[in-house]
Image: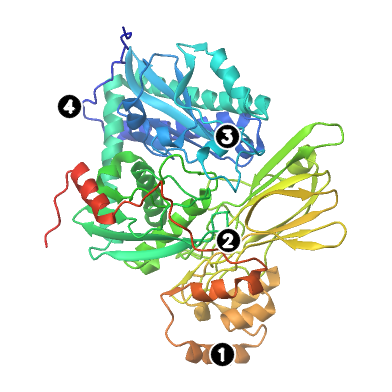
Amino acid sequence: MAATVEKPRIAAIPTDVEVDPVTLDIIEGALKSARFEMDAVLFRSAMSPVIREQHDEFPMITDPNGRMVVGQFGAYINEMMESWEGGIYPGDVILTSDPFKCSASISHTNDWLVLVPIFYEDELVGWSSQFGHQMDCGGPLPGSLPTGARTIFEEGLIIPPIKIIERGEHREDVLKLIFNNVRLPEMNRADLFAIVAGCRAGERRVVELCERFGKETYLAACQALLDRTYQAMKTLIQLAIPEEPQSFEDYVDDDGLGNGPFKMKLTIWREGDHAFFDWTGTDPQALGPVNFYLSEGMFKMFIGVYLIMVNDPQILFNDGFYPLLHIVLPEGCLLRPRYPSALGCRTHALARLFDVLGGALCKQAPELNTASGYGTSPYMLYSGWDSKGDFFYSMEILYGGIPGRPIGDGMDGHSWWPLFENIPTEYLEAYYPMRIDGYTTVTDSGGPGFHRGGNGVEKRYVYLEPGEISIHDDRWLTRPWGVLGGRPGARSSKLLQRADGTEEVLPSKCDRVEVQPGDMLVYRTAGGGGWKDRLDRPVEAVERDVSFGLVSAEFAKEGYGVVVGDAEATGAERARQREERGEAPAFDFGPPLADLLANCEAETGLAPPKPAVPLRWSPLQRGEEALALVREADGLPEPAK
């Protein structure tokens, strides 16, 4: 006979409690501070450089119904709790690393997600949650990010939702099982309990707010904050989303197994206050690990991040606007792969998603949106055994060119996710057997524009011990496009210079490349696209870039029509280029895809990818069927003919 599972008492959101504006602002400020305190606790407690230095983690605090009130990765709790078979008690801590069992709130098995219920007066008043990228989670390769994986089973330990602490007591049997399957158990344990500590900090602050203002006032304030964001997003939707459907498409270059490129297509439109985002036309999922398992809730979060950051960063980011957005993701496509698809290289599709979203939005309000960025999350992984016989493993996320924007030039060598930071050179050289020979921007890699695209970065790693390296990157084939007369940014490249003087061009995605002491990897990331007419960029801005080494004198003339130090020649050159070009194009992708594929080997030193073969076990759902299901689930009528 099955045991009875005790369900928690969930606090009701009061409908008859008014929260005055001052109290609401105080609670909002306190929740924002709690969200950043969760970050601070984690950064001070974690051991791995990926969390401690690069900040690859995201927190949130929700209301009792699992709706994010503050944070950065959206709702997943309700869906996960639907299949939860245990009870929930004060002092519990739940852990998972399975993207397929938490509404894709994490995107690969390296992300360990912690969930803590928040109780006040024996009622559930919210949840505190945070996830962080683990340096290693088992599997065939150090780092658990094999570029050749074909299923998620090849990407390390997959942890289903499970309690690691129950009613305040550690479940050591569960923890031993987990840490027995990773290469760096001490680091994993430190990072995991740093995440738990961060969640506990959020829990404490919510309880303090309930004690200070009363539970009913706190919960009413959460609802008010959600409602306020809902109203603000209505205005942004009217501003940014057209009634007439607009489509845009871009590509992930390859899947790590020689297949590609993979098209990502998005169509957007508005019906009243409601916005639709339809990924019909996106290619079927890949055999390799570039699939990005995207949930509806997660994509709504991305849309909110984009619209709020581009239009009004003062708007509190939370789940309040979710009912206004409707997402169509045909199952079996690159962004909705079927289980057990490989997901380890998903950041290429994740970053390209923002490019495609921005491109679609450009058609409604082109001067309010950006060009394309470097479009991925480049990784460099290095592992081996040193002369003492000790295992070492280093992982770093690199950055590239941010696109030219309405407010100014794109940033050089910046993360596409704004809260990430680079790992200091001193840290890398102190803890790992490597030397950083150089860390600079790549001259001329930013796309020319009235606002220049940011330059990519060149990082030169000199390896001091025998070992193996792995690389994850993209934009080696296609270019980050420019808008409104801006040009594309430069592509990425990887060159391994051996100590014996030989050189080898490496693919953008590769594993188990052996290196010896003295070998140097020259890792170049892509630049960002330019924004608006490049021939209107102020001459003094171009000459300043030349003086800083961001743009060469030759590229100043070719890309901007500027002859450095000669105003008369500049006027003549710009007039010539305008006449030759004609009207500034709305989008500039560079050469057509067919030409890129035909000239691939000559230009990059790499063989072109081959067209992908659809997977028999993952048929692509019809787009019209997916749209009809979304309308039915969201209670929306068919549009008027």
Inter-mark Cα distance, 4 to 1: 68 Å
Q: Position of residue 292 (x, y in %)?
A: 46, 47
Q: Tell me if label 2 and label 4 are in contact, CB under 8 Å.
A: no
Q: Nearer the viewer, residue 538 or 242?
A: 242
> Seen from this angle, which residue lies furthest left?
640
- Identify the mark nearer the N-term, 1 or 3: 3
Amino acid at dot 2: Gly
Q: Tell me if label 4 and label 1 are in contact, CB under 8 Å.
A: no
Amino acid at dot 1: Gly
Relative to residue 461, is residue 628 drawn left or right?
Answer: left
Mark 1 or 3: in front is 3
Inter-mark Cα distance, 1 to 3: 59 Å
Return the mark for residue 571: 1
Which residue is labeled 3 in the image?
156
The answer to whether residue 590 is visible is no
Res 228 → quadrant: top left
Which residue is labeled 2 in the image?
401
Which residue is labeled 4 in the image?
16
